[in-house]
Image: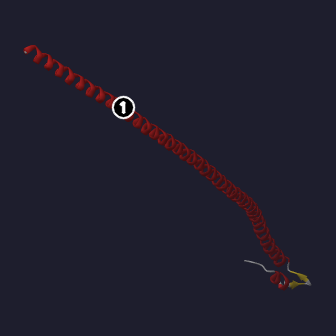
Amino acid sequence: MKITPLDIQQQQFKKTRGRYDAGEVDSFLEMVRMEMEEVLRENSELRDELKKTKNRLSELVEHERTLKDAIISTQKVVEDIKANAQKEAEIITAEARLDADKIIGNAHEQIRKLTEDVQELKRQRVRVESELQAILNSHLKLLEATSESAAHSDAEADKVALLGKK
């Protein structure tokens, strides 16, 4: 049975010969003692539970702080990684452009050299054709001269043969 402060205040004891009944007072005091023990025990349990809850809350607050710090650190690391990746991408792009410029420059140089080589080969062809033409012309003249000489020799031989028949 729960005793309230009002129950204690309103408790009345029988009086016998101007005194309170000792058994009634003792019985009431025993009830108050038992109730007080119960309240003190509950109070102690609640204090222990409160202490445990406060400790757990402190732990959770510390975990929350640690998690927040970890999240902030992670966000910073992510931002740093993004910034580094952006810088690296810019460097790679710049290097690729330089390499492309070098390749294009080399290609232009090769085209220039090939053009010069083609021009030189054309000049050599014209020179060789001219030289061959000159050789052919000189051989043709030599053939004509040889043919005329042979015709002249044949005519002389014919004359000699005619004269020898006469």
Please, is residue 93 above or below residue 147 in the view?
Answer: below
Return the x and y of residue 81 as percentages of the image width and height. 65, 53
Judging depth in this view, the residue of 60 and 41 nearest the camera is 60
Residue in the picture at 26% in, 26% down: 143
Crowding around mark 1 (Cα neighbors within 10 Å: few <14, some 14 to 19, many 20+) is few
List the single residue furthest toward the front: 166
Picture layout, residue 51 above or below residue 89: below
Q: Secondary structure at mark 1?
A: helix
Residue nearer the viewer, 39 or 15: 39
**Towards the viewer: 50 or 83:** 83
| Residue pointed to by mark 1 | 134
Residue 131, by quadrant, is top left
**Which image quadrant for residue 24?**
bottom right
Residue sitting at 13 percent across and 20 percent down? 158
Q: Write the residue at 16% across / 18% down.
A: 157
Q: Amino acid at mark 1?
A: Ala
